[in-house]
């Protein structure tokens, strides 16, 4: 007799439930491609747009200090020397430390609650930055901004990965990243408009940037509580039969590779996995480029001869082009099921741009402006692929949760580097800034190369049966191996 699936039957997406719902004496029926396509599109409509908008605001609140700088921030607060770099640096200390704990909390809470809560708090912090009167106040706000923003990006990566197959993720990750790229475009124009309010109500232009953008974040966070989706087993936008279909298609993609229990052995497998540490180096190297361009593109454009408002406007096409390039590459890498060559393509493109800026004294303004297109586009080719690639190489809920948090968290050390290498007295050539950025970019390239070789060698070893001894482990441990299961194969 055909069984009716009720809402109460769908309580978890773990493998045990999957088997209990789909097991029978005959093989399970094939998944209907049309039903799968409709489910995928429904997930796209409910998951990606709101997260993309929230990421835009997150990125703006993180880097709007660069726009505030050219609107009089340093002069009003009496900043000099490396004070600006200190204000940038302090953000990353709590941002790095709190990412893994945040994802562990997220595993136990509804994403709609946790993500909207931390967003509300960082919105209030951004708003408060508009009222600081000295460097100490600015540094304190930047510290709390880093603490509250810490869990957002890895939490979103984790949430997205729970709805899609491994080779559907890159397109969705790049759409998510497009939020930050687009933010880089319209943030400049919006900041220019807010800067024109200088003098109104007694506040300068840089203050209005923080006040208005922080207030927008607070409002959107409140609305986001009702729009952010929760875990698949409790998501209200899914019907019971759609939950079962989602579970089935992910089971087909991931097979027996689960890690849904965090015990001592699972913890050792997670924190002893070389792949995670290479993923951190990948992200750290290219993350430095992303932050360097976000923090200093307005300043560089200003030094090319454009005044503050014009410099903001001239940054817009740079990010529009980067968005288009990033999305095209995402389609290609998912379609070809290949990551490595695309990460290196981004590294090469970015390298050309950095070299041009290092030689800028001998180059016309038009070439220096073109170099910014190469740097930003190249960075946004490699960065989202590095995230998706590591995510594809992880098996199980807990391992994905911890690995995404570690990669984004510790990878943001690149942001600490970026905030300290562009020394004000070295402008406009910034030899240290561009030199270190180039070195870190190729650290990313080397990490990608070692990562790809390591995955290839591991696949060959498993093909030869070199990991089959794990099949003799106790059943409880065997069912919690994640990507250490001998049947798991890595993509590169």
Image (tube, rainbow, N blue to C red):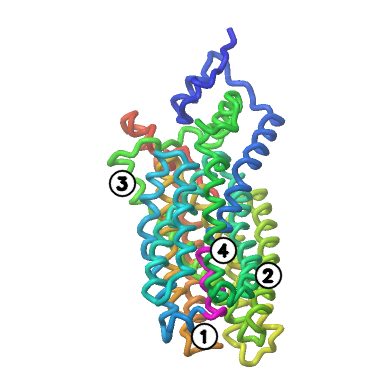
Q: CA distance from mark 1 to mark 2?
A: 23 Å
Mark 1 and mark 3 lie on one chain; the one further toward the N terminus is 3
- Look at the image and give the residue range highlighted in magenta: 61-72
Residue 269, position as x, y percentages in the image: 34, 46
Q: Position of residue 144 (x, y in %)?
A: 39, 62
Q: CA distance from mark 4 to mark 2?
A: 20 Å
Counting residues from the start of the chain, the first of labels 4 and 3 encountered is 4
Residue at mark 1? 430
Q: Is residue 367 above or below residue 194?
A: below
Q: Label 3's element?
A: helix
| Residue annotated with mark 3 | 268
Characterize the magenta stretch by its predominant secondary structure: helix
Q: Position of residue 32 (x, y in %)?
A: 68, 27
Q: Along the polypeptide, which appears first: circle 2 or circle 3?
A: 3
Where's the N terminus, which quadrant?
top right
| Numbered label attached to residue 118 | none
Q: Quadrant of residue 4?
A: top right
Q: Secondary structure at mark 2?
A: helix
Q: Is residue 260 visible?
A: yes
- Check disc 4 and report the residue beneath it: 212
């Amino acid at each position: 007799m055909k069984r009716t699936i009720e809402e109460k039957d769908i309580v978890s997406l773990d493998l045990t439930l999957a088997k209990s719902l789909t097991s029978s004496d005959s093989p399970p029926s094939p998944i209907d491609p049309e039903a799968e396509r409709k489910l995928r599109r429904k997930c796209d409509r409910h998951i990606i747009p709101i997260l993309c908008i929230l990421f835009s605001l997150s990125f703006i609140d993180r880097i709007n200090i660069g726009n505030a700088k050219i609107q009089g921030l340093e002069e009003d607060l009496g900043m000099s020397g490396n004070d600006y770099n200190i204000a940038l640096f302090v953000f990353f200390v709590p941002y790095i430390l709190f990412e893994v704990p945040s994802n562990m909390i997220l595993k136990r809470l509804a994403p709609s609650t946790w993500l909207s809560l931390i967003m509300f708090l960082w919105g209030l912090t951004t708003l408060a930055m508009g009222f600081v009167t000295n460097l100490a106040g600015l540094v304190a706000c930047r510290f709390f901004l880093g603490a509250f923003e810490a869990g957002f990006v890895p939490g979103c990566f984790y949430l997205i990965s729970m709805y899609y197959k491994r080779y559907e993720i890159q397109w969705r990750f790049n759409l998510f990243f497009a939020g930050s790229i687009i933010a880089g475009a319209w943030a400049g124009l919006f900041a220019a408009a807010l800067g024109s309010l200088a003098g109104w109500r007694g506040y300068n232009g840089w203050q209005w940037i923080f006040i208005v953008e922080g207030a927008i974040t607070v409002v959107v966070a409140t609305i986001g509580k009702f729009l952010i989706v929760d875990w698949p087993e409790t998501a209200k936008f899914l019907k019971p039969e759609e939950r079962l279909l989602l579970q089935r298609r992910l089971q087909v993609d991931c097979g027996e590779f689960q890690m849904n229990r965090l015990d001592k052995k699972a913890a050792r497998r997670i924190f002893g996995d070389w792949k995670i540490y290479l993923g951190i180096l990948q992200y750290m190297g290219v993350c430095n480029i992303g932050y360097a361009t976000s923090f200093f593109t307005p300043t560089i454009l200003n030094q090319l001869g454009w005044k503050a408002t014009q410099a903001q406007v001239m940054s817009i096409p740079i990010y529009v082009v980067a968005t288009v390039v990033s999305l095209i590459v995402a389609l290609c890498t998912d379609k070809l099921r290949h990551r490595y060559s695309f990460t290196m393509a981004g590294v090469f493109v970015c390298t050309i741009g950095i070299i041009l800026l290092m030689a800028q004294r001998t180059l016309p303004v038009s070439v220096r402006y073109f170099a910014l297109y190469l740097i930003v586009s190249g960075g946004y080719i490699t960065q989202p692929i590095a995230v998706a690639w590591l995510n594809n190489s992880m098996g199980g809920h807990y391992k994905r949760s911890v690995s995404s948090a570690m990669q984004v968290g510790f990878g943001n050390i690149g942001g600490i580097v970026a905030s300290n290498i562009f020394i004000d007295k070295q402008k406009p050539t910034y030899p240290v800034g561009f030199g270190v950025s180039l070195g870190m970019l190729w650290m990313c390239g080397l990490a990608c190369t070692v990562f790809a070789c390591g995955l290839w060698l591991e696949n060959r070893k498993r093909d030869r049966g070199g990991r089959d001894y794990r099949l003799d482990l106790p059943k409880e441990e065997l069912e919690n191996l994640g990507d250490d299961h001998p049947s798991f194969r890595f993509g590169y």
